[in-house]
Amino acid sequence: MPRTTPFRFHALALALLAGAAGSVQAADYSGAAPDATAAAPTAVPPFKHPGLLMTQNRLASIRAAVQSGNSSAMKTGYNRLLQDNRGSHTYAHQALATVEVVRAAGGPQEGRWKNDGFAAYLNALRWAVTGDTRNRDKAVQILDAWSAKFTGFTLAPGTDAPQAWLEAAWGLPVWASAAEILRHHDGGAAGWPQASQDRFNGYLNKLYGYANQASNRTNNWGVSGALAMMATGVYQDDANRYNAGLNRIKQLIPGIVYSSGEVQELAARDCHHPQYSLAGIAQAAEMATIQGDTSVWLLKVGNEPQPRFSRGLEYMAKSILYGEGVRDCRSFGLYPGYSEIAVNGYMNRGTPIPNFQNATKRGRPDGNAAEFIGWSAATHGRDDF
């Protein structure tokens, strides 16, 4: 078995990373401040719970759609979610004391950690929708096992320290979303013991210690890190952590979505990585909206007539639908987990994104997203577009 090296942070590495982040800022972004009407965060305690991507009303809507005899986008999406066996109460989880991170690959320990996080979320969601206590018990078992055993990440040979930041940034919102449902659905009906909640809070703090450092980068890493900060803040009722993540998301948007609408990394990399940024921004926007702040959806730069993020969605959709722009993505589709959230968010704001809506309908229902929470049709699908 290859030897792993303990993961430690160094101030010099942080300084170098911060400098590198500044160097990749979008060339067409002059540093102009976002529209003042979208600048000030409004989320302060008390936070609304459940309050990550699921509200109590949304959970009730999913349940109603599933129980209805009529077909719907949400019901079709939920049936797709049920095909993932990680959501079964018979899923076999296995907590580890340390998780080895492998650069640009993903080793078996990392896969175990990710799969168990998604299993906790899927089981918690299925319990909230169906009331099956076996799903509740499985979600609780997974969270309790990992929070009792996990101590940190290690690095496989040849893997640099920041890779653990990114993996934690991807995973943290998944784990927090599972815990948020168990802790707050139906006034705490899960009966999750306070001692277990406290232990999970310590687990979340360990992940946060890695994840928040990814936010220093001005690319999809930064978006993922900021989303993780917001998720931690909501779950922990910590306004400082939440607002730091929210403000970082809004700082990043003009550098992630250029004034033309082009999404960063689309020209230089592929059709996949730019959508990591779009997925993270959409989920952050939804999280902020639940907490009473629509500024991520509505953020504009200067005198632009349309919100900057909506322009990025349209640019990506045209690449996928028609092969337009800097890269032809017609052989690809929308990355799962954000399309229905974005459509819902902009329809509720009265902002047209017709091409993105068409791409969303073509790709229904979405499934597992691997890095972020997926299954947005199951949770946010609507039938009026």
Image (spheres, rainbow, N blue to C red):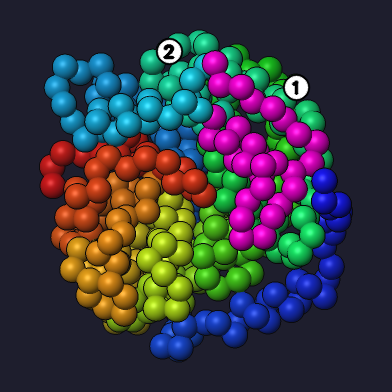
Report x, y in % for residue 249.
Answer: 50, 64
**In the figure, residue 174 lies in which quadrant?**
top right
Residue 55 lies within the magenta run: no
Q: Which residues are magenta?
A: 90-119
Q: Is residue 209 left or right of residue 66?
A: right
Give the vertical position of 92 relative to 133 (above or below). Answer: below
Q: Is residue 188 left or right of residue 380?
A: right
For image coordinates 26% across by 78% down, the residue present is 325
Q: Nearer the viewer, residue 18 or 371?
A: 371
**CB under 8 Å between discs 2 and 1:** no
Q: CA distance from mark 2 to mark 1?
A: 24 Å
* Rendered image: mark on residue 300: none
Give the vertical position of 262 relative to 154 (above or below). Answer: below
Report x, y in % for residue 385.
Answer: 13, 47
For image coordinates 25% across by 48% down, the residue present is 363
Q: Which residue is mark 2?
A: 131
